[in-house]
Image (cartoon, grey):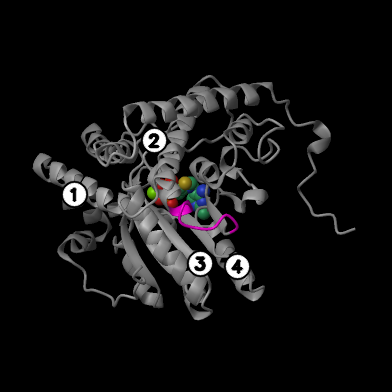
Amino acid sequence: MSELKVRPLRPRDANAATSGAGVAGAVEARDPRDEINATELRQEHEDRLHRQEELIERLEPALLLEMYYQMLLIRRFEEKAAEAYTLGKIGGFCHLYIGQEAVAVGSIAAINKDDYVMTSYRDHGHALARGTSPDEVMAELFGRAGGVSAGKGGSMHLFDRDNYFLGGHAIVGGQIPLATGVAFAAKYRETKQISVVYFGEAAVNQGVFHESLNMAQLWKLPCVYICENNQYGMGTSLARAMSQQDVSQKACSYGLASDFVDGMDVLAVYDATCRAAERARKQSLPSLLEIRTYRFMGHSMSDPGNYRTRAEIEKYQERDPVKVFGASLRNKGIADDSKLKGIEERVRSEIEHAVKFADESPEPAPEELFAHVYANPL
Ligand SMILES: Cc1ncc(C[n+]2csc(CCOP(=O)(O)OP(=O)(O)O)c2C)c(N)n1
Ligand SMILES: [Mg+2]
């Protein structure tokens, strides 16, 4: 496996230069890569399938099928969560991950069970990929005592210490310095664990992102920083909010290794994360992965979504990571239609079970109000 490299800073390319027109100009600026060209789209789709099929040959069928199962589990789980939200079973905010499944699944498959994982409020997919049961995630969304955070965290605050999943963080970028500290602790204690942290591209504009990368490289911390670039921070497109839109290049300022990864291809994500994890574990060095993805749903359940066109959404739905991977598995003879149908049925029954479990789980007891709030030093 080739090692990740530190790249020198490149001069801005023509695309990036379109964003240098100042705030007023940038509001109008559209990334030329977003214009819809059917021929290009087909070509890109075929290239992705081809790349994915090459990687399939290098991996064990059991691992490939597990990744497919997890992606489908997340997709169906979230569709059910959206339904439950509209029925009033879920209170508060609820941010869906539909469209981004390949990022959590591909990257978590590439690390050890006892490596630490932290993410933002868009956290259902990461918890499920990490191994938290759908029952416990659904019950948490319903605010029930059987939830993974005892029903007191809700959708944005899943937390599962047994699976080394340290949240679910609602403050944009808040998890980045925390994960840097976790990497410091792992290094200090010589445990050989690594810390993997996910955040959206809007978090990259926060100071803590830059402070964390600087410290991680300076102190040689085993941390993998994964920017899930879904190209929008709430209703604001990347082009309107970021002067240098090539997020992976931000690593150059701090001498970190970085990579730009296709987030619609679960195996490209797996491959890139294997390299970053190896760099962290063997050399105790951090990396930044910019994984380009797209959310198919609104920012949260209350988002009417009128800042982007239907055509743009459909363009990305053509690249649906679950469908693309299913097609590759079929083309390479890893799974036939009946095998894929079997996985779909297994997922469906697990989701049904999760809803029943959540419905039947009691509300947290009033005396639980102060539990888990302060550590008791005595
Ligand atoms: C410090 C802070 N500022 C603002 C908010 C409100 N807010 C919640 S999500 C969000 C957008 C974040 O977008 P991005 O980081 O790209 O993640 P995505 O939602 O696309 O996954 C904002 C501004 C917040 N939660 N925390
Ligand atoms: Mg975003």
* Magenta part of the chain: 107-114
Whether residue 356 is situated above or below residue 41 in the rendered picture: above
Residue type beneath disc 2: Gly
Q: Main secondary structure of the magenta part?
A: loop
Residue 70 coordinates in the image, percent (x, y): 46, 39
Q: What separation in Å lies between label 3 and label 4 (alpha carbons)? A: 9 Å
Q: Is residue 209 visible?
A: no
Q: Earlier in the sequence, mark 2 or mark 3?
A: 3
Residue at the farthest bottom position: 218
As helix, strand or loop, the secondary structure at mark 2 comes to loop
**Dot 4 or dot 2, earlier in sequence:** 4
Q: In this figure, which residue is indicated by the disc labeled 3?
A: 223
Secondary structure state at the residue bearing disc 3 = strand
Give x and y (percent) for residue 143. Answer: 65, 31
Dividing the image into 4 quarters, which one contains the C terminus? Answer: bottom right
What is the CA distance from the residue labelled 4 to the residue labelled 1? 39 Å
Please state which amino acid type lies under the numbered disc 4: Gly
Whole-angstrom CA distance, mark 2 to mark 3, is 30 Å
- In space, the residues marked 1 and 3 are separated at their CA atoms by 31 Å
The picture places residue 374, in percent across and down from the top left corner, at 79, 52
Alpha carbon of mark 2 to alpha carbon of mark 1: how far? Answer: 28 Å
| Residue pointed to by mark 4 | 181
Residue 321 in percent (x, y) is at 32, 41
Residue designated by label 2: 298
- Sooner in the amino-acid sequence: mark 1 or mark 3: 1
Q: In the image, which is nearer the foreground, mark 1 or mark 3?
A: 1
Proximity of marks 3 and 4: CB atoms separated by less than 8 Å: no
Magenta-colored stretch includes residue 228: no
In this rendering, position of residue 221 left or right of residue 259: right
Q: Residue at x 36, y 68 (%)?
A: 1
